[in-house]
Image (spheres, rainbow, N blue to C red):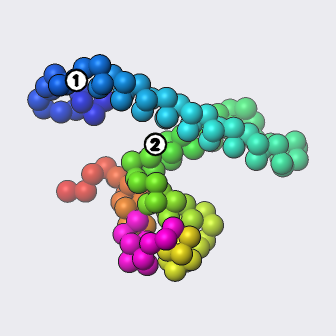
Amino acid sequence: MRLLGREELRAPREPRAFLVAVAKGLLFDYFRRAALEQAYLSELMLIPESEHPSPEEQHLILEDLKAIDRLLGKLSSKARAAFLYNRLDGLGHAEIAQRLGVSVPRVRQYLAQGIRQCYIALYGEPL
């Protein structure tokens, strides 16, 4: 999709290697999303059945989770981890820095990257 968005589309120098790289990326995405779905379903089993969302709601929740995953998938692994530690676990900058083995200013940069991705998802690219 990124290639189609380019103004000029050039032929790859190594078409076979290019296709292998694309295939690997698709497989990684598929397995990451399958793991995300399985994690959601596992958590769902921990709550009483009377409180389970309807099948339609479950589908919408899974679609939202996949959209969030795509959004955060554009970040580096450390930026994604820092953002999730902060937003989901409520960890502070110093604790995140210690867990990731980076400086506090780097954690601030990671969080800014995550917030920027959220902004883009809601409002589009900033001018």
Residue drawn 73% across the image and 32% down it: 55
Whole-percent x and y of residue 118? 42, 56
Distance between mark 2 and mark 1 Cα atoms: 27 Å
User: In this picture, which residue range is highlighted in magenta?
Assistant: 100-110
Q: Give x and y (percent) for residue 96.
A: 53, 72
Is 102 positioned to the left or the right of 56 in the image? left
Question: Are the two marked residues, 2 and 1, in contact with CB atoms closer than 8 angstroms?
Answer: no
| In front: label 2 or label 1 | 1
Q: Residue at x 49, y 35 (%)?
A: 29
Q: Position of residue 13 (x, y in %)?
A: 17, 25
Magenta segment's dominant SS is: helix
Residue 52, compared with residue 10, is above or below; it is below
Disc 2 secondary structure class: helix
Closest to the observer: 6 or 11? 11
Q: Label 2 neighbourhood size at 10 Å, few (<14), some (14-19), many (20+)?
A: few
Asked if 88 appears above or below 106 in the picture, the reply is above
Furthest residue in direction top, as rendered: 16
What's the residue type where badge 2 is placed? Arg
User: Which residue is at the front of the view, 112 or 32?
Assistant: 32
Q: Quadrant of the C terminus?
A: bottom left
Q: Amino acid at mark 1?
A: Glu
Element at label 1:
loop
49 up-or-down from 94: above or below: above
Residue 65, percent from left and from top: 57, 44
- The disc placed on residue 14 is 1
Taking the spot 76% from the left edge, 42% from the top edge, the residue there is 42
For the N terminus, the quadrant is top left
- Whether residue 107 appears in magenta in the rendering, the answer is yes
Point out the residue furthest to the left here. 8
Which labelled disc corresponds to residue 70? 2
Q: Residues within 10 Å of mark 1 (few under 14, many from 20)?
A: few
